[in-house]
Amino acid sequence: RKEVEQDPGPFNVPEGATVAFNCTYSNSASQSFFWYRQDCRKEPKLLMSVYSSGNEDGRFTAQLNRASQYISLLIRDSKLSDSATYLCVVSGNFGNEKLTFGTGTRLTIIP
Amino acid sequence: SQTIHQWPATLVQPVGSPLSLECTVEGTSNPNLYWYRQAAGRGLQLLFYSVGIGQISSEVPQNLSASRPQDRQFILSSKKLLLSDSGFYLCAWMYKGRTTNTEAFFGQGTRLTVV
């Protein structure tokens, strides 16, 4: 089983729609969770951290379910500029510095 | 503010030639440093990470090695490149949190083509 699993997509979604991604992780000791965005042929950039209580940043909402070991990302009112690959990232607590990426979910917003 | 430099941006090397990719971080001390590789259309594969000078953890046995001669310098090397070493190589740094790890910040990457 992969340490971090994501649906690779692609997701083709009309502009203005809501889209949700899920990610599962295998190590129950994982402590830190993130969503990154990667544009074509560019480096990944942090989209948002994921906290146990859930967090929202504008049109983006991230949720963490520790019991089921999954993380979600919700994008509301999608824009053309949201087209990218979204990467789920998991790391351990202090002392376990390994940072593991999912393979990413490709999203294309259709005009 | 912290910055990360990675070079070169693009590299074409013949099979069997050596490789040296350098990554440096500015504006922070004692960071965690990472080397990732991304093959075309694939996810990021962790190659090496380092929590301090001279401390290297290897994730995948392969044709590559890494070194950290200085606190903010991380080098990826190979003595003889293989075709399968082609890919997008990314260096990243992460601030050491006291209880949890913070996010990682990436360099702009090196696109390596082995011919």
Image (spheres, coloured by chain):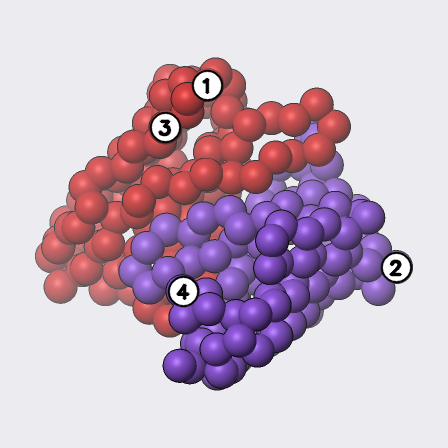
The amino acid marked with disc number 1 is: Thr
Residue A109 position within the rendered picture, expressed as x and y whole percent measured from the top left: 44, 76
In the figure, what tint was chain B given? red
The amino acid marked with disc number 2 is: Ala
Query: Marks 2 and 1, how far apart in space?
Result: 35 Å
Q: Mark 2 points at which residue?
A: A67
Give the chain of mark 2. Answer: A
Give the chain of mark 4. Answer: A
Q: Do labels 3 and 2 share a chain?
A: no
Query: Marks 4 and 2, how far apart in space?
Result: 33 Å
Say if mark 3 contacts mark 2, CB within 8 Å: no
Query: Marks 3 and 1, how far apart in space?
Result: 9 Å
Observer-side mark, 4 or 2, equals 4
Left or right of residue B84: residue A66:
right
Residue A94 position within the rendered picture, expressed as x and y whole percent measured from the top left: 70, 31
Q: Name the residue under label 4.
A: A81
Say if mark 3 contacts mark 1, CB within 8 Å: no
Observer-side mark, 3 or 2, equals 3
Residue nearer the viewer, B92 or B81: B92
Q: Name the residue under label 3.
A: B3
Of helix, strand and loop, which one carries label 4? helix
Give the chain of mark 1. Answer: B
Whether residue A25 can be seen here:
no
Of helix, strand and loop, which one carries label 3? strand
Q: Name the residue under label 1.
A: B28
Query: Marks 3 and 4, how far apart in space?
Result: 25 Å
The amino acid marked with disc number 4 is: Ser
Residue A26 position within the rendered picture, expressed as x and y whole percent measured from the top left: 74, 60
Give the chain of mark 3. Answer: B
